[in-house]
Image (spheres, rainbow, N blue to C red):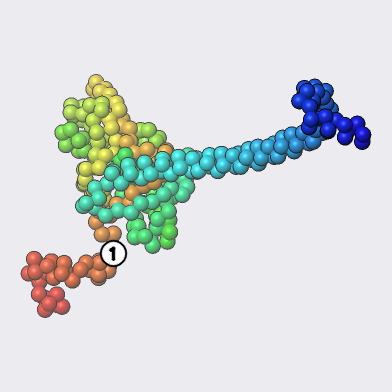
Amino acid sequence: MLAASALMFADTRFTRMEEVRAQLSTLVAPIQWAVSLPSDVLNWGSLALSDQRALLEENRRLREQILTLSHRVQHMASLTAENVRLRELLSASRRDDMPFITAELLSLDPDPFTHQMVVDRGRRHGVYVGQPVMDAAGLVGQVTAVSGYSSRVLTVADASHALPVQVNRNGLRFIAQGSGRYDALSVMHVPDTADIRAGDLLITSGLAGRFPAGYPVARVAEVVHDPGQPFARVTATPVAQLQRSRHFLLLFPTPPPGADDEAWDLELSADAVEAARALIGLDADQEAR
């Protein structure tokens, strides 16, 4: 205590003590560092652990976000592709002059010798037997059986399917029959001298009243002229994507066979009905008779 008091008195009275104090501070600096070392280590460890926990938590959140965004990207890619297909499908139909409904593929016939499929539209949606079916590229086939909520479609590739077609370039009319293969149709009874060549587009002719005229069916792939034979062998490739399409158009070119006339009249406005009656000169008394 006496030494401390003497040093304090000397520090306040003599200026030379500042140098002594500086020397003593240098001597005790390692001691101060050693004393504060445990506290500094604890603080550094606590900070490192907290930073590590924060980094781990942030890493977990980022991984979850990556998985969520990846799922959304995959879903968006699927929706984008479906949107493109639907836009192509809509552009394949002349929407201004022919009503239609869209349909989606439900299943394919497992029989390898038939080319049929089932779509998710049926009698409840106005589908009828014989209704033409298209995809974004061309004619797919026609409806052969209808239930309440689904329908069976016979494709143009089936061996039992045939339809009248014409060459888009010059209007020559023929019959295109399925060959049992998705990639080939047979053009029947083509005279050996007929003006038909590879690359010609075959479209529906509108004959027989089932398929509307002007829709693409197939493109001529090969024309084989056999000397001495009256007919050439003509093979065409369907333009419809029969093995890949999932969305289709069901066209309504004419009222379904056997439809009730009153039901169709109810779909017309009163002004349209009156205009039609006036056009054909039918009055109320004649209509009643």
Horizontal and vertical percent position of residue 35: 83, 32
- Is 272 drawn above or below residue 34 in the view shown? below
What residue is drawn where x is 36% and y is 45%? 86
Q: Is residue 208 above or below residue 44?
A: below
Q: Amino acid at mark 1?
A: Ala
Q: Residue furthest front?
A: 13
Query: Which quadrant of the view contains residue 51?
Result: top right
Q: Residue at x 25, y 23 (%)?
A: 225
In-image side of 12 versus 164 (left or right)? right
Residue drawn 25% across the image and 28% down it: 199
Residue 177 horizontal/vertical position (percent): 32, 39
Quarter of the picture holding the N terminus: top right
Residue 114 position in % (x across, y down): 43, 42
> Splitting the image into 4 quarters, where does residue 194 fall?
top left
Q: Quadrant of residue 146?
A: bottom left
Mark 1 sits on what residue?
Answer: 259
For this rendering, which residue is in front, 21 or 26?
Answer: 21
**Residue found at the far right of this picture:** 2
274 lies above or below 83? below
Residue 155 in view here? no
Q: Can residue 269 be seen?
A: yes
Q: Quadrant of the C terminus?
A: bottom left
Q: Is residue 52 left or right of residue 118?
A: right
